[in-house]
Image (tube, rainbow, N blue to C red):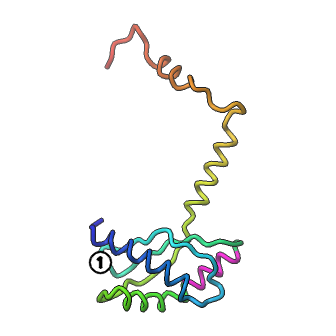
Amino acid sequence: MSRRIDRLSAQLKRELATLIRLRVKDPRVGLVTVTHVRVTNDLTQAKVFVQVQGSPAEREAAMEGLDAAAPFLRGQLGATLKIRRAPELTFEEDESLDHALRIEQLLDEVRPAGGWEDGDEDDAEEDSTDEGSTPR
């Protein structure tokens, strides 16, 4: 990605977080955190990743509220950032935290009761090398 796109993505993230918190009056949009913005190379579209707090129904309603507010937010971005054409905004729920929590849960299930032994890695390396063999 170019530096310009990286800078624009970071700036959009900051501005959108502020606009959503202060200017969006839709009651469906509750506690929303903008986690990442991905702008296309031609700068015409921006995918906004958000984390939404609440039940699945509340999260779905918040996403609908954000989609409804997208034209307003785009206009505000154009005026605030003084760019020729603000990108079209599409909102997508960021599920990376949910994935990380699920991985942690799975690791907890397979972790031995006493934890991992410190010498396990060293033993595995010694088993893989054979003194009588020649290196390839």
User: Which of the pair 87/76 is nearer the observer?
Assistant: 76
Query: Residue tagged by mark 1?
Result: 42
> Is residue 65 inside the magenta stretch?
yes
Q: Taking 116 as reference, is 103 above or below it?
A: below
Write the start and end of the magenta stretch as one range. 57-66
Mark 1 burial class by Cα count in 10 Å: few <14, some 14-19, many 20+: few
Q: Taking 111 as reference, is 1 above or below it?
A: below
Say which residue appears at 60% left-offset and 83% top-offset: 64
User: Which of the pair 76/89 is nearer the observer?
Assistant: 76
Q: Quadrant of residue 42?
A: bottom left
| Quadrant of the image containing the N terminus | bottom left
Where residue 79 appears, as percent x and y from the top left, is 37, 91
**Predominant secondary structure, magenta span:** helix
Q: Is residue 63 left or right of residue 1?
A: right
> Is residue 70 inside the magenta stretch?
no
Q: Taking 50 as reference, is 75 above or below it?
A: below
Say which residue appears at 34% left-offset and 82% top-offset: 44
Where residue 99 appears, as percent x and y from the top left, is 59, 57
Element type at mark 1:
loop
Where residue 106 appears, as percent x and y from the top left, is 65, 46
